[in-house]
Image (spheres, rainbow, N blue to C red):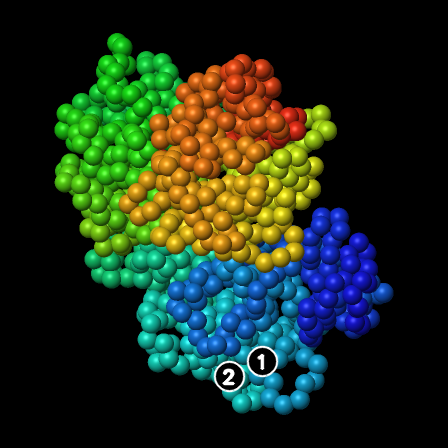
Amino acid sequence: MTLSSGTKLGPYEIVATIGAGGMGEVYRAKDPRLKRDVAIKVLPSSVAADADRLRRFETEAQTAGGLNHPNITAVYELGSHDGAPYIVQELLEGETLRSRLAGGPLPVRKATEYAIQTARGLAAAHEKGIVHRDLKPENLFVTNDGRVKILDFGLAKLTQADGAAGPQTNLPTATKGTEPGVVMGTLGYMSPEQVKGKQSDARSDIFSFGAILYEMLSGARAFSRETAAETMSAILREDPPDLSATNKNVQPGLERVVRHCLEKSPEERFHSAHDLAFDLEALSGTSPAGAVAAAPARRLRVRALPALLAVLLAALAAAGGYLAGTRRAPSTQPSFKQLTFRKGPIWSARFGSDGKSVLYSAAWDGKPEHIYLTRPDSPESSPFGVPGSAIRAVSPSGELAVALRSDRDGPFTRAGTLARAAASGGGAPRELLERVQYADWTPDGKDLLVVRNAEGKTRLEFPVGRVLYETTGWIDAPRFSPKGDRIAFVDHPILSDDGGTIAVVNLAGKKTPLTGPYATASGSGWSPDGSEVWFTAADVGANRSLIAAAADGSLRTRVLARAPGTLSLLDVSRDGRALVSRDMATTGIVAMAPGADREADLTWLDWSLFGDFSRDGRTIVFSETGEGGGAGYSAYIRGTDGSPAIRLGQGSAIALSEDGKSVLALIRSANESRMVIYPTGAGETRPIKTPGLNPVGGRFLPDGRILLMAAEPGKRRRWRVLDPRTGAIKPLPYEGYRFAWVAPDGQRFGSLDAEGRSVICTVDGEDPRAIPGFEPADTFAGWSSDGASVYVRRGSPTTIPARIDRVSLSTGRAEPFREIYPPDVTGVTTLHAFEVAQDGRSYAYGYTRMLSTLFVMDGLTR
């Protein structure tokens, strides 16, 4: 059955034929309800003619539709047309892996990247009991933005050969069931148990995966013979040629992973796609396990032990020459002792000088932050006697470094007045220095290092006033080594992102990186012997693991522990115990749509970060930057009426054009950032060239030009005006500034200068003008439609409720606009990114909620 353009399938309208195959025909169609294009696969009439197969197809399609993972093609709907069943899926732009392989083997880095994404998708499906059974390059799709999508989950049971003539060493060979004795799969990628017609499970997918990875690396199929019988014999009895014979760039560790996938016995393969993904990540230079070698071909069988021990043993086995023969895994698994039981965020924590007590800062149950004291042998916490303060460090003698009046001063940082307090908590703290973000005592307790922001840069100072390292990004968790000769910290290159690397700096100011970049990284601490720096990080998403990096700069790392949720390392004791918080953090979006009488929560996945708001208040663009966003994050657009969000592509969505047809997105990589323009409807993605510049932000001007924030190497960020049609870039004299709110006339924009003051700038580069009626902590929240007034959010982002005023630019007179209070304040730490639409009625804002639990981890030392 062939459908012509304009044919209606339910609410969908056929646009064109995409392709056809043994599974039926695939069409491009329009969904007028959501104004998006979709792919519709219409199954052959033979499926409809067999009631049993049709019933199984419907069950399988419904199951596949329940999968929600960035590396699995989304299934939207199941339907029927003239008796032929069809499924509606997301429309993908790109090509199959088979097409990519037509040009020969892939670079090792690219093959590994595709393999990791595929393994993650398989793991997500296997965890729900879904096995693909027909994994092959034709069923792996590579989108234009580099994301791998697994196709046809749940449909393999319907695949069958149609009697093609000639050699059939790569044909689908399934009959209608999955019972033992039935051959099912694609010859050449089938597992031995599939060839034998035996029951197959998730480990069969792992074998097929190994054959695909072998082909990506070598350019040749692992099991390809002249006849089907010879191919089946090779799968059952032979190993493919060594990868090193065809690709000398394949390291031994990666070849061992491939061999481990292709074991003839399912018992000897990886036991799960999750383990497989973990080992591939360990081989990649940007994984949580760093640059360690691959696991040996035979994995220790630890099914009887908890999952945490299994991961720990795998990480230790994966360390190759770093660990082999010289280090031993702990004899017991790490233990977790819960210390806190209330609801709210924990900002910092330290072991007491006695090594037993714990001091931590938390904002429980919506109340202000306070320091609490607890011990692992007691479930109770008692307030410590320094009201309104946050713990920063504890000296060997028990003296405390605390932050008074601590408040947020950046997307991920809090600053306050640094003070010294007695160990007993009695007496008034002695104030030392204002606007300090972090501090740590020297090992002898005689002096303090500090991190603070000045002149648009974040500086690590020791002693105070002497800069050892500075960045236009931010610095997290600086900690002195046991000998006091080096300082470990997390180096975040982008102010608005928590991705970064672990580094050390010596007292002469020489910085040494210890790891490659992570998608998220937090906390640092030294192992008791000073040979490692411990930290929490994740290569993708937000679920951080506890990791150790060799302190010698060799880039060797090992995973200490993993746990559900996001771990944040807060301190390491002298005997090797770790103080960690498990943070269940989310960022969401709330909007008041035009004509609505109440706010609507528009949060989509787990970390929805508000980007921009249309002038009429009907559309927002945002980013998913957590687990759901995947590698490199994901850019989305959504109506404020609550209609489903539409993924535009990789990156962070930062601006919406005046006409609503384009979205500006920032795609960050390890060493640089780049910008693209995504169409909100039909059209092609356009890259934005910024030669010699590292873009960090931007906004559309009404005439289509872009107000670009970018930095040259070694210099501070600066506003520029970029014309995407000609590529012309005009620098503006606003250096060290951040954020922009463009006026309706397109000539003015509000910004924060290098000192954090709200000012009005122009695209012609005129001198910045202070805004009457703005206090230092106030921030822009939009422009009135006539450009004569601005909306301002009063006070800090941590102030709840948030007060929004309308301020006249000529007189400074303020009129109340709205007071905003989230429906559920528990754990809400900030209300941020306010934007009032020019209709003067609609608005949107973001919120961050964090619920933390404090633990002591033991059993980590070797």
Q: Position of residue 417 (x, y in %)?
A: 30, 20
Residue on which the image places disc 2: 224
Tell me which numbered mark, 1 or 2, is placed earlier along the sequence. 1
In the picture, the disc for residue 646 is none
Relative image position of residue 350 (x, y in whole percent):
30, 29
Who's the residue at 81% across and 56% down the image?
10
Can residue 196 be seen here? The reply is: no
- Tell me if residue 241 can be seen: yes
The amino acid type, in three-letter code, at marker 1 is Asn
Q: Which quadrant holds residue 285?
A: bottom left
Above or below — where is 655 with respect to 321?
above
The percent coordinates of residue 154 (x first, y second) are: 65, 63
Observer-nearest of 403 and 47: 403
- Tag on residue 170? 1
- Quarter of the image with the N terminus is bottom right
Pointers 1 and 2 in contact (C-beta within 8 Å): yes
Q: Residue at x 72, y 69 (%)?
A: 17
In this view, 290 is above or below 294: above
- In this view of the protein, which residue sits in the foreground, 862 or 404? 404
| Residue furthest out toward the top | 427
Question: Which residue does the image show at 62% across and 28% down from the upper left?
Answer: 785
In the image: residue 842, left or right of residue 253: right
At mark 2, the secondary structure is: loop
Q: Residue at x 63, y 48 (%)?
A: 661
The answer for how far apart the CA atoms under marks 1 and 2 are is 8 Å
User: Dot 2 surroundings within 10 Å: few (below 14), some, or many (20 or more)?
Assistant: some
Q: Residues within 10 Å of mark 1 (few under 14, many from 20)?
A: some
